[in-house]
Image (cartoon, rainbow, N blue to C red):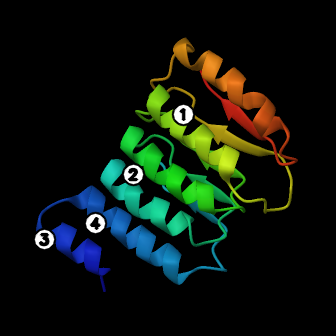
Amino acid sequence: RLAPGAARAARYGDVGRAVGACVGDYVFRQVGRLRAVALVRGGLGDAAVEWIGRALAACDLVELLLDDNRVGDGGAAALAGGLAANGSLRVLGLADNCVTNVGLGALLGALRTRPAGGDGGAARLDLARNHTDDRLAPWICQYAPLLARDPAFWGLALE
């Protein structure tokens, strides 16, 4: 049985949105039990990741891997919205996507405001091989001291 949003998207041929709605619906139903989700090389774009961002805000995921998809700034912003409300996520993998400085800025802003939670261990945001560039360096330097005050400081991977 498809989630309502998935059924509607499937009727209109939007496979990415249908997959995202199914995943989001599944994650919502698994709240409290699901700890890691890996959707690597799934062709997921911003529309699909919007649903995942909503689910992220309401669950206790520890690891979310979305590497090698088609996630851009819109998807990064949706994930940032979920991340800002989620205190348990320790690993967010977005390597090999289409995120630019705009999306990275949204994610870093969410890390700055997110609630405390999780096991307090080191965490990682992987944005290797995206479309970020060195113009973001001053912004990262501005936020680094704020992030470092968090005992669960996030490591950042950029290539």
Instruction: Provide the residue designation for mark 2.
Output: 42
| SS label for mark 2 | loop
| SS label for mark 3 | helix
Front position among marks 3 and 1: 1
Residue at horizontal 43%, vertical 69%? Answer: 23
Q: CA distance from mark 2 to mark 4?
A: 12 Å
Q: Quadrant of the C terminus?
A: top right
Instruction: Provide the residue designation for mark 4.
Output: 18
Q: CA distance from mark 3 to mark 1?
A: 35 Å
Q: Are marks 2 and 4 in contact (CB under 8 Å)?
A: no
Q: Is residue 41 visible?
A: no
Residue at horizontal 72%, vertical 53%? Answer: 90
Q: CA distance from mark 2 to mark 1?
A: 24 Å
Residue at horizontal 44%, vertical 70%? Answer: 24
Residue at horizontal 50%, vertical 49%? Answer: 66
Which residue is more in the foreground, 38 or 121?
A: 121
Q: With respect to residue 8, does 50 lie above or below?
A: above
Which residue is more in the foreground, 157 or 107?
A: 107
Kind of residue at disc 3: Arg
Q: Percent x, y for residue 26?
A: 46, 77
Kind of residue at disc 1: Gly
| SS label for mark 4 | helix
Q: Percent x, y for residue 50?
A: 39, 57
